[in-house]
Amino acid sequence: MSSVSQKAVEQDPKQLHEDLHDIWGNPKGLKALTIVNHTTLGLRFMITGMVFFLIGGILAMLVRTQLAMPDQDFMSPDIYNQVTTMHGTVMMFLFAIPMLEGLAIYMIPKMIGARDLVCPRLTSLGYWCYLFGGIILTSSLILEIAPSSGWFMYTPLSSSEFSPDLGPDFWLLGITFVEISALSAGVEIVVSILRTRTQGMALHKMPLFAWYILAMALMIVVGFPPLILASVMLELERAVGMPFFEVASGGDPILWQHLFWLFGHPEVYIIFLPAAGIISTLIPVFAGRPIVGYGWVVFAIIVTGFISFGLWVHHMFTVGIPQLAQAFFSAASMLVAVPTAIQVFVWLATLWLGKPKMKLPMLWVLGFLIIFVCGGLTGVMLALVPFNWQVHDTHFVVAHMHYVLVGGMFFPLIAGLYYWLPLFSGRMPSENLGRWGFWLTFLGFNGTFLIMHWTGLLGMPRRVYTYDTGMGWDIFNLLSSVSSFVMSAGIAMVLLDIALHFRFGKPAKQNPWNADTLEWANTMPPSAYNFVSLPRIETRHPLWDDPNLPVTMAEGKHSLAVATHGRREMWGTDPISGKVREIIHLPGNSWWPLFAAMALAVVCISLLVRVYALAGVFVLIAGVFLLRWSWENGAHPKAAPDADVSPGDPPLHSRTMDGPGVWAMGTFLIANGSFFLSYLFGWFYLWTVSPEWSMPDTSPLSLVGLVVAALVMTAGYIVMVKMIRGLRRQQDAGLASGFYLAGALGAVQVAVTTWVMLAADLAPTETTHDAVLLLGLIYALFHGGLAVVLTVMQALRVRYGYVGAHAPFEPAVVVQLWRYNAVVFWILVGSLAVLPRVIGG
């Protein structure tokens, strides 16, 4: 920090607090909808997630009431199927992932010494998409047209032939909307952890919770696009008749299972890893010593992330895959237990070598250890193919899933909430109410699902709405149902305790648990800007090594304790070493994320009611909102019109060419690449496996036309690269003209590709082959058009003076899209036009 700003802080630290509050503070009233602050948005995610959890819990109670006795008619078969489908959907998509993302959004900047997440408007967009998508999805329950095909929506049960109602459409459109939110948060969290850690916090000094969240976010970025692709394909099949999953036309319903579980099994670990991160954070604090084997835990996190993507067929052993594939995925399913076991042994060793204090959060930690280990053992059992064949689609699988997901996520989540409650509210939870809540939940959970393993072994299938009295399942189902209500009482007591403590809890002292991580250097509850000054961190345990750090940070005795520039500022650091690179200036509160999400919600509703013209109009409106949002960046008057910084401080990120936006675009393109690779997987899978696949002797696509389009796009990319090289040399002569030229070349590529698509005379509603071709061409056209629009916008921003040698950042972001488009288009040419000509049908 400069000596000038240091002197100002020493003179009046109270004034500095007030100035920072004026810059970062949240507005009241209707303008509260514009808030982009991570603390507020993280709380909104978690509160909304808890509401959906209550909805999912009520649905679970309805299921257990129906199954408590044989021959029940409490619910009709159709309503029962709707309830079970929505229970799984709500818990997996509307509670588990958003809740953990909300916790990460709230905690990560505080843990890594940042003032906010790096793309705050993206966080806001993610929240509104989550809220609107969840409302659209759950509204189907009120209308009694909820999906009834199971939370995994297997085809052909979810296809129009067997589900002609709107239920699957609610699921497909609502879930896709929610997944936009998940991907937004994933991109945001990855870039924030890599690029905004406080100075000195190298990767090997980062809190373990941040490692877990980084792995979770990267897995979301890679793992969610396959399901988005599958949802798009199934909705296209239902809405316009493109037969991706119909065998008679050349499709295959098993393709849906592959795409779904390419998402679904990594999701298990996407849910588990943040929960394990909570455990790895709490155990050292309550054991009173650093965690044993920090490096081994990081290794286990990385290995778990990689292996989890090789397990998807673990759920498909009964669909008729080759024995060699069964052997491979069976071995992989057992192998993933190794990194998980490493973490369990590290936790136990830390407790053994420390002096554990059995506070309320530790009760939930111990409950997790017991339940999750049991769930892991049954997981190894299910990895054995012969055993899997016997218990597949029985209540044994239901019990295993709940042991892994509820035990592996819910118990650590409650432990974390109790641990961080003083940070949220400044008050301590009630030990008595909390312990009653734990024991009722723990005993009720095991009573519900431990017994369910036995009913599964006795042959009770899942997804049946009733059963006969002579099957031998009566008493076990009754015990499970009674226990489920005990568990519900425990959860209700926990929620009551959390709600009451905000008013009646004892005031908490600073760092009440004697924790070691930076979030406890905050005020309780935290300010909108988290930290008055940003410290240099040289250790994994900053508060243990310097207990006075919260005081010196609040007094502004560290870096970036300045508010005179009127910007929301924080450090941009090297992703490996934590060395300061630039000052990141963040946008303020904005209506644009809300407006864009509302427009997208109208698109979803229009598609549901089949008013496609209205959907098209609001796609354009959403695009306008997003472009208007992107206009307020860089050197724009509402962003950072001047580049002034304090003497000795690094430049603003918008005056460099390696700011966080470059990393955000790169991370988004990883997700985009996952979507595209999933598309290629579907193309080659159908080509080689689908029993009725039909391919013409020669591709209907014009090879010459596609090559011309690819060459023109490559030329546009070369022009963009030339402009970027000039900016790196601080040369911007002819910059706008260069962008216009690149945009024109991109427009030619779009036009030629459109001609190729129209000249091919495809029949996408008659054959799967043509439907897949059309989908690939539309993908290429969308990305080509997007590149044209963004490039022309850059030319306009040059004219307005927002982009140039003085502010070269934004073109470095756009050129990545051009590079991606060029590579993808050439791959499409080879896959869709060249290979069919070489190999033949």
Image (cartoon, helix red, strand yellow):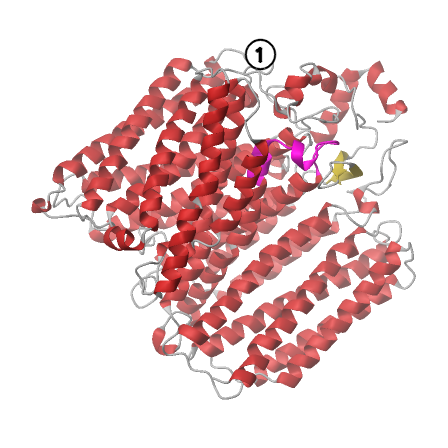
Q: Residue at x 86, y 33 (%)?
A: 649
Does 585 sit above or below residue 685?
above
Does 23 sit above or below residue 667?
above
For the image, the number of numbered tags is: 1
Q: Does the magenta-highlighted stretch encompass residue 32?
A: no
Q: Residue at x 84, y 46 (%)?
A: 655
User: In the figure, is residue 399 to the left or right of 264?
Assistant: left
State the residue in front, 775 or 591: 775
Measured from the top left, where is residue 452 in percent x and y? 23, 40
User: In the figure, is residue 296 to the left or right of 633?
Assistant: left
Q: Quadrant of residue 520?
A: top right
- Magenta segment range? 196-213
Quadrant occupied by the N terminus: top right
The kind of residue on which mark 1 rests is Lys
Residue found at the very far bottom of the displayed protein = 697
Does 13 sit above or below residue 804?
above
Does 109 sit above or below residue 683?
above
User: In the figure, is residue 681 to the left or right of 485?
Assistant: right
Residue to which mark 1 is pinned: 509
- Callout 1: helix, strand or loop? loop
Measured from the top left, where is residue 790 in percent x and y? 72, 60
Q: Quadrant of residue 710?
A: bottom right
Measured from the top left, where is residue 445 in percent x and y? 30, 31
State the residue in front, 695 or 49: 695
* Residue 316 visible in the snapshot: yes
Q: Does the magenta-highlighted stretch encompass residue 200?
A: yes
Mark 1 neighbour density, 10 Å: few (under 14) some (14–19) many (20 or more): few
User: In the figure, is residue 358 to the left or right of 445?
Assistant: right
Q: Residue at x 67, y 18 (%)?
A: 545
* Residue 495 visible in the snapshot: no
Measured from the top left, where is residue 14 in percent x and y? 76, 16
